[in-house]
Amino acid sequence: MEVIIQPDAKAAADLTARLVAKELQDKPRLVLGLATGRTMETVYRRLVEMHRTENLDFSGVATFNLDEYVGLAAENEDSYRYYMKRHFFKHVNLRTVNVHLPDGMAEDLDAECVHYEQAIHDAGGIDLQLLGIGADGHIGFNEPLSALQSRTRVKALTPATIEQNAWHFSVPEKMPRRALTMGVGTILECRRCILLALGETKAGIIAAAVEGPITSMISASALQLHPHCTIIVDEAAASRLRGAEYYRWIFENEPEWQPYRKLMKR
């Protein structure tokens, strides 16, 4: 695991987008895992801008989203598919056939979860997975006590998650109480992952996930086991990291980050 601290939210999101772009340029048929939420919106705006101004090409990309609410159709404005279409899909040249999200309207939800796992396998596995982090440390909808080897499944949402996410809904009281989500084990099988966290409200949980023990109570802590995981935070989200100075030194001095340091200084 490596932690990259950026001066503000804009710089952190821009670095995240630049890393996605680099992976795509290196592998045009990239299998890209996607996340939703306010944190990701700036990343998607930046990727859309790079598509328009730098000819970043998504035509060969296959995408797999982390999760979807149970009971919401694709055209429902509160669904994650609709979110992705609004913020990303309709603005770039992704092929519709290559876009995948769990089907929250499936008659057999358990069978849908098995099907989703198989679709990821058939695509060759996820090359790069984007992640946010919930206030309780969940990735995807892997709520506290999620098994660290869990697979895509139906998950009941905690009151804390419902409170955190209800603002997204046109009628907050109608937010679904269950979701389909990739499991922690599914996420850990990606070849590379990038977790982006912004703001002081994420400082405590980032410190616990990055520097605390690996525990099923904080599913993001399982990322400590991943061989190629990058945590990108702004200064506010980094404020409770004990090793912050060391992490800053790595970004400022390690050769692999030199191209990005130059970009950040433009």
Image: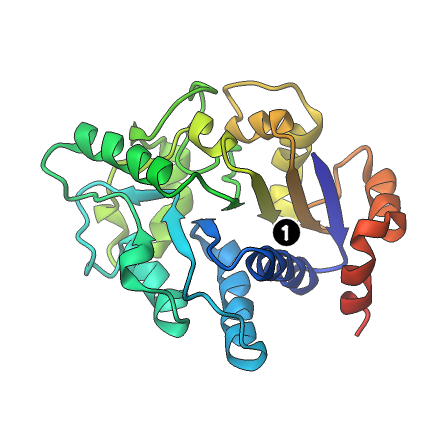
Compared with 113, 264 (above or below) is below
- Colouring used for the render: rainbow
Q: Residue furthest bottom?
A: 53
* Residue 64 visible in this rendered orientation of the protein: yes
Q: Nearer the viewer, residue 207 or 247?
A: 247
Task: Tally the numbered discs.
Answer: 1
Q: Nearer the viewer, residue 64 or 58?
A: 58
Q: x and y percent of residue 193 in the render?
A: 57, 41
Seen in the image, is 201 located left or right of residue 265? left
Q: x and y percent of residue 23 in the render?
A: 59, 55
Q: Which kind of residue does numbered mark 1 sit on?
A: Gly
Q: x and y percent of residue 47 in the render?
A: 53, 67
Q: Nearer the viewer, residue 236 or 98?
A: 98
Compared with 224, 60 (above or below) is below
At a point 83% along the width and 58% down the height, the residue shown is 258
Q: Nearer the viewer, residue 136 or 155?
A: 155
* Residue 169 visible in this rendered orientation of the protein: no
Tell me where residue 110 sits by quadrant: top left
At a point 45% along the width and 28% down the height, the residue shown is 184
Seen in the image, is 202 located left or right of residue 266? left
Question: Dot 1, crowdedness within 10 Å: few (<14), some or many (≥20)?
Answer: some
Q: Quadrant of the C terminus?
A: bottom right
Tell me where residue 169 sits by quadrant: bottom left
At a point 36% along the width and 30% down the height, the residue shown is 158
Label 1: which residue? Answer: 199
Q: Quadrant of the N terminus?
A: top right
Compared with 257, 192 (above or below) is above
Q: x and y percent of residue 30 in the render?
A: 48, 53
